[in-house]
Amino acid sequence: MSAPHERRAAVTGIGVVAPNGTSTETFWKATREGLNVLDRVTREGCGHLPLKVAGEVRAFEPSAAVEERYLVQTDRFTHFGMAAADLALEDARLGQADIAEAPFSAGVVTAAGSGGGEFGQRELQKLWGKGSRFVGPWQSIAWFYAASTGQISIRRGLKGPCSVVAADEAGGLDALAHAARAVHRGTDVIVAGSTEAPLAPYSMVCQLGYPELSRVEDPERAYRPFTDQACGFVPAEGGAMLVVEEAAAARERGVPVRAFVAGHASTFTGASCWERSRQGLAEAIRGALADARCAPEEVDVVFADALGVPEADRAEALAIADALGARGRRVPVTAPKTGTGRGYCAAPVLDAAAAVLAMEHDLIPPTPNVFDVCHDLDLVTHRARAAQVRTALVLSRGLMGSNSALVLRHGAAGAS
Amino acid sequence: MSDRITVEELSELMKKTAGITVSPQELRDRPDTAFEEFGIDSLGLLGIVGELENRHGTAMPVDAERCKTPREFLALVNSSLLAGA
């Protein structure tokens, strides 16, 4: 994503609240080791539903992460968002005083596909159980997709450009791209990413209609993309926020550039039209590479969408081959989300976080629970693979038909 | 339940409906401090008014949710409850 004034969008902070870790350190350790944390759903009121396995964020204590007013006024997905934003800002060494110095040059972009379902359900039960006078005023904010952006902005005093991508899974990557564009246009700091909380009764019922949802009850067999055992995807909660910052501004502050958001493109091929997603995803990859001025040979790793539906897996494998040519058959591909589940918009943001960490550690994390790959892909399985990673390609497709690709470059990548 | 709203009840409502903890003593000591300063914004006050209406089974004056301070708010809602009693 080049800009006229050569403003470059860098990642300077990572904040993770994921099923496999509620700090970047624990997340990376679990991801690197290929830990599977998919497990039986234990969230209240969900036990009787025919969706038995998910990625829950069990180590998260909302009251330790956010103030009481936000516990009362916002949904769990916003609690995750606030906690992840705090971690990302701390990681980027941006304190309240730094933000207060230039509040209009710091904004928020989030993506949401699920919204505040738990909060919404509670208020709707009051509406139908007791009457409209018993619905609290926070319902007017808390369950909407935009809630996390607004509340993070208010809580941290981020008064610059704020926006929300209400979308399917691919929206997570689109939010990061939107943040990069805001940086190109003149904003120095954008807190960007996605957190979701779809593991509550109402939200779970909404998902039961997805034919792509895995109904397998064994956590180790429920989500195995790219194998002939593929039986759908497993949902998850949590997510990640990144600090996307103008590179020169970061250097001026003495904060290291951890990666560059180098290129992005997205396409749309229709809900559940997985065969057609081949063409759409390939086009998104080509667009993102062109945007990043990146040749296919430069791609060191692909973080796959890995839906776990045979037709979709085939389309993705073919899209990678179509767009990367000869490189497509040799490039290492990974899908760490098989160990944590797919947190809708949050899933590709966690992948982007993992991609930055992979570049920093020269280590490609593996794809948990996946062993016998039945596609022409070099999928990293069993254990992490040491490799120099300078350029990462992150892919995401949504159940509603979006296909997005994001190119991340190593923090030491040249100014060209 | 008393027909008069006390600082104790207001303190409890602020905590329950908006998640803001301010002790009754503090409300007594600083009755002219703006709700905004305590962390109660317009939606917060709207929630308190709604809860009071449900508890007392009567509508509060339309200006109740526009009150700026605890003193102003208690005076208005209590005069309204007294008039309705």
Image (cartoon, coloured by chain):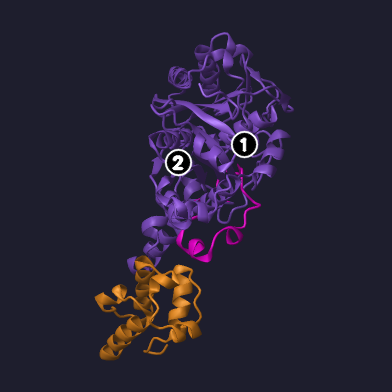
Chain colours: A purple, B orange
Q: What segment carries the magenta color?
A: A48-77
- Asked if the magenta segment contains residue A65, the reply would be yes
User: Where is residue A305, by image quadrant?
Assistant: top right
- Residue type at mark 1 is Val
Residue furthest toward the front?
A: A252
Q: Residue at x 45, y 55 (%)?
A: A157
Residue A29 visible at all: yes
In percent of width and height, residue A221 lies at 67, 33
From the image, tell me which residue sits under label 1: A216
In percent of width and height, residue A113 lies at 44, 41
- Residue type at mark 2 is Asp
In percent of width and height, residue A195 lies at 52, 45
Q: Earlier in the sequence, mark 2 or mark 1?
A: 2
Q: Residue at x 54, y 9 (%)?
A: A325
Q: Residue at x 51, y 80 (%)?
A: B23
Q: Chain of mark 2?
A: A
Q: Nearer the viewer, residue A217 or A97?
A: A97
Image height check: is A163 above or below A381?
A: below
Is there a contact, CB below 8 Å, between mark 2 and mark 1? no
From the image, tell me which residue sits under label 2: A188
* Helix, strand or loop for disc 2: loop
Q: Nearer the viewer, residue B35 or A221?
A: B35
In percent of width and height, residue A212 lies at 51, 32
Q: Residues within 10 Å of mark 1 (few under 14, many from 20)?
A: some
